[in-house]
Amino acid sequence: MAENRPPGKHKGLVIINTGEGKGKSTAAFGLLLRAWGRGMKVAAVQFIKGETSKFGEHMALEKMGVEVIPAGRGFTWTSHDLDVDAEKARRGWKTASEMILSGDYDVMMLDEITYPIRYGWIEVSEVIETLSRRPQMMHVVLTGRHAPAELIEFADLVTEMKMVKHPYREQGVTAQKGIEY
Amino acid sequence: MAENRPPGKHKGLVIINTGEGKGKSTAAFGLLLRAWGRGMKVAAVQFIKGETSKFGEHMALEKMGVEVIPAGRGFTWTSHDLDVDAEKARRGWKTASEMILSGDYDVMMLDEITYPIRYGWIEVSEVIETLSRRPQMMHVVLTGRHAPAELIEFADLVTEMKMVKHPYREQGVTAQKGIEY
């Protein structure tokens, strides 16, 4: 199938994975994996996950030689100083926008960027402005719940991950290493 | 966050990514990536994608040293001999079930297995029977549209990927290397 594609336009896509279900970040990591498999230059900025936590995807991307920039300190409901979180998010966005505009990357992931946008730490208009000036063939995938309407309007491909069945609620099973983180 | 988990049960999960939207296989590949990052043994059987096609995720998993077993010949609407497809799917399932029961793998992906089930080439009862005999801590992720009700009933975690916006319909953009395949 891959060898026999119908003709059509090619362009860099703005992709959003949103919704209450699982798989938003995971699918974005899968995209990075696929692009990396094709020899494309990929990178990720993680807006919530902190510098000290070691997540499976982070370890994998390190092993693969892919840049992952941490721009958070873990989830904010465990934070004691929201100003520090806001400042980290702002700095993360500055780095991300420079990377997006650098022309050095084929695919970039902005993991959980919807949260700092929702908290008012990053303006959605800034994000859209940077995305609209990105290299023409560059793909950017953004993840997180509650993607703002303006971003959905601007995006090319938007998927909502919907929870149908969840073991942590229904069976009291806890989050598990290698699967959830 | 990863360092500070609430107590709870641990068990291997049966995970289904279904629905009409994007990201079903991609999220499953992301799961493999995450588990591989943790040093877990992972593998994939692909029930639709063929032996000759070179997909980005396939290339990535090869680079990572992960086994990927092709058990298809591309999408069936391009096939001329459905018996051959059925036979390949049957053989793919035999291999997959042996791998599942071997105890050698921590996480396995059965990519697009819902299609051969739907076509009647693999019995859903066989799949459930094998999954129920797998090692207790083993995770299996199954992907594809139209996951059968019995399988959803049996699974621990089910996510529906719902298309909100799609560039190939709305803008005439074609599928793109590194992103779609």
Image (cartoon, coloured by chain):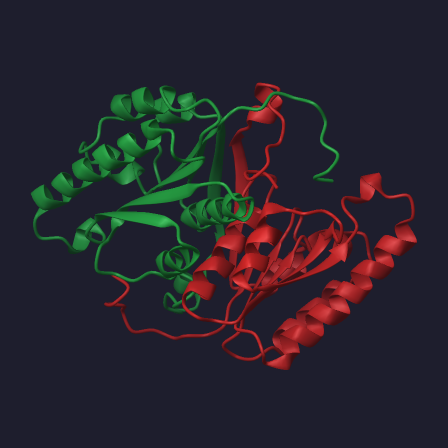
Chain colours: A red, B green
User: Where does the image place residue B97, in percent across and percent down from the top left?
Assistant: 28, 30
Residue at figure coordinates x 37%, y 65% from the top left:
B175
Please say whether residue A18 is visible from this viewpoint: no
User: Where does the image place residue B114, in percent across and percent down from the top left?
Assistant: 30, 37
| Residue A111, image quadrant | bottom right
**Count of number-bearing discs:** 0
Report the front residue among A82 and B138. B138
Q: Is residue B91 left or right of residue A154?
A: left
B127 up-or-down from A85: above or below: above
Residue at figure coordinates x 72%, y 58% from the top left:
A70
Quadrant in the picture for the C terminus of chain A: top right
Report the front residue among A112 and B166. A112
A124 up-or-down from B28: above or below: below
User: Where does the image place residue B127, in percent across and percent down from the top left?
Assistant: 29, 26
Please say whether residue B61 is visible from this viewpoint: yes
Residue at figure coordinates x 33%, y 60% from the top left:
B55
| Residue A15, image quadrant | bottom right
A118 up-or-down from B118: above or below: below
Residue at figure coordinates x 48%, y 54% from the top left:
A30
Report the front residue among A153 and A140. A140
B131 up-or-down from B79: above or below: above
